[in-house]
Amino acid sequence: MDPGIVTGDSWAGISDLMRALWLLLPLVVVFGGSLLLSLAVIPSLVTSGELPARAEKLRAPLYFVAAVAFVAYLVALGAVVQAAGIIDRFWPRWWI
């Protein structure tokens, strides 16, 4: 099945889809990095004595950053799902 004609309106929708997709990458990196630091790196360094015990106070803000990044990821994922509807305009078969 050949794809249909891609109009200017479709290109605008594809642009929105790509923008939403690219937004997912930094959100995942921030989420994963915050959890990695707060759950693994900081406790390990405090236990080994490489960091002072007061560094444990950094874990709560990192949990908050991870939670915000996760919620933002869910919102962006919803935007991706909504914007993915543009594909139907020029490619009617989703599963090839």
Image (cartoon, rainbow, N blue to C red):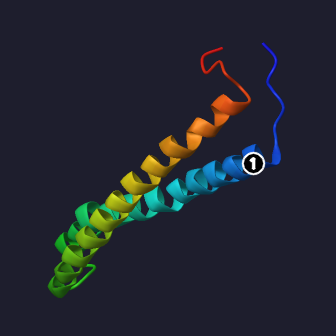
Residue 88 found in image quarter = top right
Measured from the top left, where is residue 21 in percent x and y?
58, 50
Q: Is residue 53 left or right of residue 17?
A: left
Total numbered labels placed on residues in the image: 1
Measured from the top left, where is residue 64 in percent x and y?
25, 71
For the N terminus, the image quarter is top right
Q: Is residue 24 left or right of residue 42?
A: right
Q: Is residue 48 visible?
A: yes
For the C terminus, the image quarter is top right
**Residue to which mark 1 is pinned:** 9
Measured from the top left, where is residue 6 in percent x and y?
81, 37
Identified at 65% across, 18% down, the residue is 93
The amino acid marked with disc number 1 is: Asp
Identified at 75% across, 48% down, the residue is 9
Q: Is residue 26 above or below residue 84?
A: below
Measured from the top left, where is residue 69 in percent x and y?
37, 64
Identified at 21% across, 68% down, the residue is 43
Secondary structure at numbered mark 1? helix
Q: Is residue 35 left or right of residue 2?
A: left
